[in-house]
Amino acid sequence: MNLFNRDYSREDLGKYFGSLEQFAGLRKYSFSQGRAKNIEVVEFRTGSGLRFEVLVDRGLDIGLCEFKGIPISFRSAVGEASPYLFEAEGDQWFRNFSGGLLTGCGLTYLGSPNKDQGQKLGLHGRISNIPAESVSTYEEKNKNSIFLNLRGKVREAKTLSTNLLLERKISTEVGKSKIIIQDKIINEGFTVEPLMFLYHINLGHPLVDQGAKLVTDSLDVKARDDISAQYLNDYATYLGPTPDFPDVVFYHDLRENEDGYCEVSLVNEKMGLAFKLKYKKENLPNFVQWKYTNQGNYVTGLEPSNSKVEGRNKARKNGELEYIKPGEQKEYYLEMSVEEL
């Protein structure tokens, strides 16, 4: 494996380092005060400069992410917040949205607040505010590689109705700057359920900056609404913090390669840095680009999803709402990496 600009074998590592923890590994801790009090965290360090925190009590979301000390993820003024502070109504989801590298949205609804078949639904669902269970961490070693892994389960359930289980594995290789997420959603109930699932990947400054570019192989790009349409021609480029910049969203139909993967990059040539995203399109047919380059909230979202973000009611009316049958399971695969240009 390559570390510190040189190659090491597993045997070499044993000679030079008394413990893997000198440069990489998994560490568990919890926050001790404020809105984040008692949230359990698993920290990953790969030795390449990649460091990130998995938030056990926030649906196994990924919070802080940095590369060689450079922040990659967006962080809102809210900061990490306990799931027990979650407010489901309207857009109150934002009161518990810290940003972070990855926020899960779903599982039975997401997108704009709406009323669907008599049920009032808030923004982006509940899964991010459900503590995980059966969480384990472990290392895997072979001849010249070491993998750091986390497994856990997050259950979205309601007595007399919904029982959906998200099984998640997060893994990374020592010496690399890539995060791999393998998810499985299982309907463990006995009724057909709506299924809406989105990876809300949030990137911030300095990676996001004036002149940064989104690189995609898009077959088609459409604006979510009339406001977004005003910015459609410039969807791929980013401005600096702009007063009164609106909340704009673009829907991409991405070309998949022969293996069924889509690839997206956010490139900052001035920094010599790129964030790259690769995922299986089979169960994530939509790619949602969110631009909110306002002052103080300076962020872009790269969001693979099985749905658009205008709410369950509209998805149902448009014939776009996906369902999951009792006993059925859906699998998802996602890679996120940071690369120096």
Image (tube, rainbow, N blue to C red):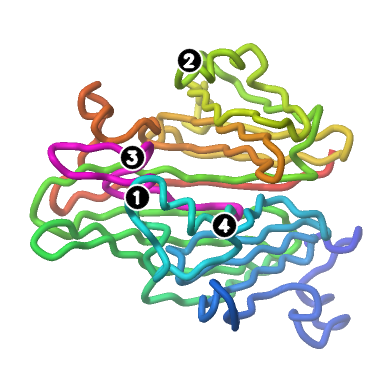
Answer with the quarter of the image where residue 158 lies.
bottom left
Q: Is residue 214 left or right of residue 222?
A: right
Residue 94, image x, y percentages: 48, 51
Alpha-carbon span between mark 3 and mark 2: 18 Å
Amino acid at circle 3: Pro
Answer with the quarter of the image where residue 142 lies.
bottom right
Quickly name the residue at label 4. 98
Amino acid at circle 2: Asp
Secondary element at tag 3: loop
Disc 4 or 3, which lies upstream in sequence?
A: 4
Q: Is residue 313 above or below residue 47?
A: above
Alpha-carbon span between mark 1 and mark 2: 25 Å
Quickly name the residue at label 1. 125
Quickly name the residue at label 2. 226
Quickly name the residue at label 3. 113
Residue 287, image x, y percentages: 49, 30
* CB under 8 Å between discs 1 and 2: no
Alpha-carbon span between mark 4 and mark 2: 28 Å
Q: Quadrant of the N terminus?
A: bottom right
Amino acid at circle 4: Ser
Answer with the quarter of the image where residue 264 lies.
top right
Is residue 42 highlighted in magenta? no
Q: Is residue 115 above or below residue 82?
A: above
* Mark 2 burial class by Cα count in 10 Å: few <14, some 14-19, many 20+: few
Alpha-carbon span between mark 4 and mark 3: 19 Å
Is residue 109 highlighted in magenta? yes
